[in-house]
Amino acid sequence: MKAICSIIGLVVFALAGSHAFAGTVRYNTAGSTLSCNGVAGCSQNTPTSISLGGLTLTYNTGSASGLVTPSIINLGNVVSTGTGSNVNLAGLLLTINVNSTPPMAVGTLPNGAFSGSLSTNSSGAVIMFSPNNTTTGFGTLPGVVIAGGGESFTYQILNPTLGVQAPTVGNPVGQTSIQGAVTDTSSTTINYNTTGSTLSCNGVVGCVENTMTTVTVGGLSITYNTGSGSGVVIPSIVNLGNLVSTGTGSATLTGLLLTINVNSSPPGSSGALPLGGISGAMSTHTSRAILSFPQSNTTSTFGSLPGVTIGTGATAFTYQILDTNLGLQAPTVGNPVGQTSIQGSVAFASIFANGFEAN
């Protein structure tokens, strides 16, 4: 099993810039259970220990105090002991309970289901936690949001598929550690605008650039109007501006280029979305023109889409274009007339999006 420790350095770097969302928390996993769950021949020794086929599996709780979030945490471990051969663990169930202060509330992580066989000296057994139901800066992972008193903390399993150590293997021997993460998700909000964006002729014959955001071609004018938002709760759908067509005429718009610049606070920096190319013809009353964003270069809770990640580590946010092919409205069509709205999204950027190895 390839340890998550190999990426701890990246996470430490990420935490260094995370003060905007930092909250201090203490937690423990008391009340968790490891159950036979009806498996034939299994004995329930205690709520956290079972015996099966000569082997004993015990869940030991995890805890910490004074943690500055976001942090990687210890969610406990499962220790195997005894003597057995090819013992089928399928059906055993691990339920990790998290007691968090703040907000002095309790939540349960998605269940960990055992499968595969375990022997004294070897293991083909795994614990699989599912579903991947929460999203933070650590990624979209199995987790639980624990909320109360206006505060919320998201606890997640960092490695949803864990290989179970055999009784004579590992350091410490027989121990399978369960790494998690905690993030303060109490009303994480951002402000943004698309000031600095440009709409350019890009060499189109007969096109005139009136301003940085307006062009005229064939009697038609196309103007990009900026979008903005404040106090936007992450993740959200956002307004990335619009294109408005006016005038009388007919023109081929192929080659016009839209560059949307996003200024985001936090983290107090900017980034440009993938270029939007315009193609097709437009006249006063009809349009076959399309605005296309072809490069699906980012992945977030909204999917794999054209986007830009602004910031680093836990203060990184991914802005994306939700509709990658937009039909442009003719000057006399639409409500408002001539307007083509550009919908986008903003979400936490996963610091594990590239190069993460789950096992």
Image (cartoon, rainbow, N blue to C red):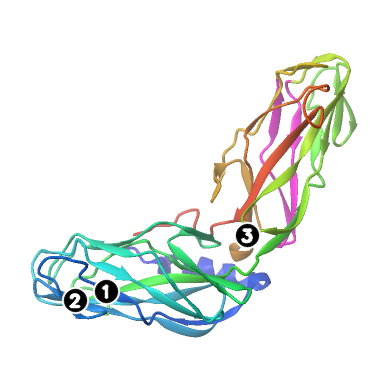
Q: How crowded is mark 2: few (under 14 residues within 10 Å), some or many (20 or more)?
A: many
Q: Any mark on residue 305, and which?
A: none
Callout in the foreground (3, 1): 1
The total number of labels drawn is: 3
Q: Residue furthest top?
A: 250
Instruction: Residue at 75%, 45% (x, y): give it.
Output: 261
Q: In which quarter of the image is the C terminus?
A: bottom left
- The residue that mark 1 highlights is 34
Residues in magenta?
A: 254-279
- The residue that mark 2 highlights is 50
Q: Residues within 10 Å of mark 3 (few under 14, many from 20)?
A: many
Q: In this view, does 198 lie to the left or right of 89?
A: right
Give above or below for 251 relative to 302. above
Q: Do the residues labelled 2 and 3 touch (CB within 8 Å)?
A: no
- The residue that mark 3 highlights is 316
Q: Main secondary structure of the magenta part?
A: strand
Instruction: Residue at 73%, 45% (x, y): give it.
Output: 239
Which of the two labelled residues, at mark 2 and mark 3, occupies the earlier sequence position?
2
Residues at marks 3 and 1, CA–CA distance in whole angstroms: 36 Å
Asked if one can make out residue 24 in the rendered structure from this viewpoint, the answer is yes
Q: In the rendering, at what x and y percent does residue 170 appear?
A: 25, 74
SS category of the residue bearing label 1? strand
Q: Is residue 342 left or right of residue 217?
A: left
SS category of the residue bearing label 2? strand
SS category of the residue bearing label 3? loop
Q: Quadrant of the N terminus?
A: bottom left
Q: What residue type is labelled 1?
A: Leu
Residues at marks 2 and 3, CA–CA distance in whole angstroms: 43 Å
Give above or below for 298 relative to 188. above
